Amino acid sequence: MSSAPRVLIAPSLLSADFANFAGAARAAREAGAELLHFDVMDGVFVPNITFGAQTVRALRHHSDALFDVHLMIVQPERYIEEFAQAGADIITVHAEACVHLQRVLAQIRECGVRAGVSLNPATPLSAIEYVVPDIDLLLIMTVNPGFGGQRFIPEMLRKIAHARAMLDEAGSEAWLEVDGGINGITTPMVVRAGARVLVAGSSVFGHPEGVRAGVEELRRAVWEAEERV
């Protein structure tokens, strides 16, 4: 799953204009973002409701970005096939929402899609220790999921670093992704801790100078972090 540049940008539609998702998707891709992040919420696992597979399917015709679908829902196994058929390239489920996590990850891969697993801030890495060989992406939540625009939880830097060490020790090529409070200030810190995919919502779609400026600001912050390594 190697790719260049070394750190990838995944703007989150949660912070985009819901009345113009197609325009937001095109703007993000034109700005150089490699992924488009879909925060799918059911109002049960998290206290918010967003969108479903129909949104993924509709936007598939408007973007060639990798579609990074983050299922913040209970019993995600009910909808894996539907999201895969809608055009998802990556489907990420929460360890906390799966009774049989390994089975769900296998289900995702059987659909021909990359399998990701996400952990809430208070969930320890030990929750996914024995499924590392089954994942293509590990998503560390750096805020409590449910709403955009939240502040980054500083304690998560240590968790990101430990996740990086876990993946490296296992010889895993899984991408290490972070989501929550990612902006020009927090980006250098999470990149130095080992993150390789940055989910950013308000800092991209809410940037006062537009989407391109938001993506470019994150890219400059990545370069700053890499220069200091």
Image (cartoon, rainbow, N blue to C red):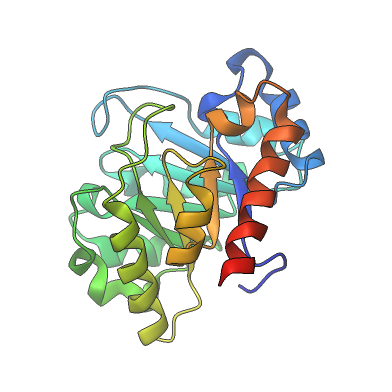
Does residue 132 appear anywhere in the picture? yes
Indicate whether 112 appears above or below 204.
Answer: below
| Nearer the observer, 154 or 68 | 154
Question: Picture coordinates of residue 83 (x, y %)?
Answer: 51, 44
**Quadrant of res 213:** top right
Question: Picture coordinates of residue 110 (x, y %)?
Answer: 47, 66
Residue at (54, 33) in percent of width and height: 201
* Furthest residue toward front: 228
Residue at (59, 36) in percent of width and height: 56
In the shown orientation, is residue 38 left or right of residue 72? right
In the shown orientation, is residue 128 left or right of residue 176? left
Does residue 54 appear anywhere in the picture? no
| Nearer the observer, 94 or 180 | 180
Q: If the image is split into quadrants, where does the C terminus sit?
A: bottom right
Residue at (34, 39) in percent of width and height: 72
**Quadrant of res 20:** top right
| Nearer the observer, 164 or 126 | 164
Q: If the image is split into quadrants, where does the N terminus sit?
A: bottom right
Residue at (35, 46) in percent of width and height: 142
In the shown orientation, is residue 171 left or right of residue 62? left
* Furthest residue toward right: 30
* Furthest residue toward top: 19
Question: Picture coordinates of residue 113 (x, y %)?
Answer: 54, 60
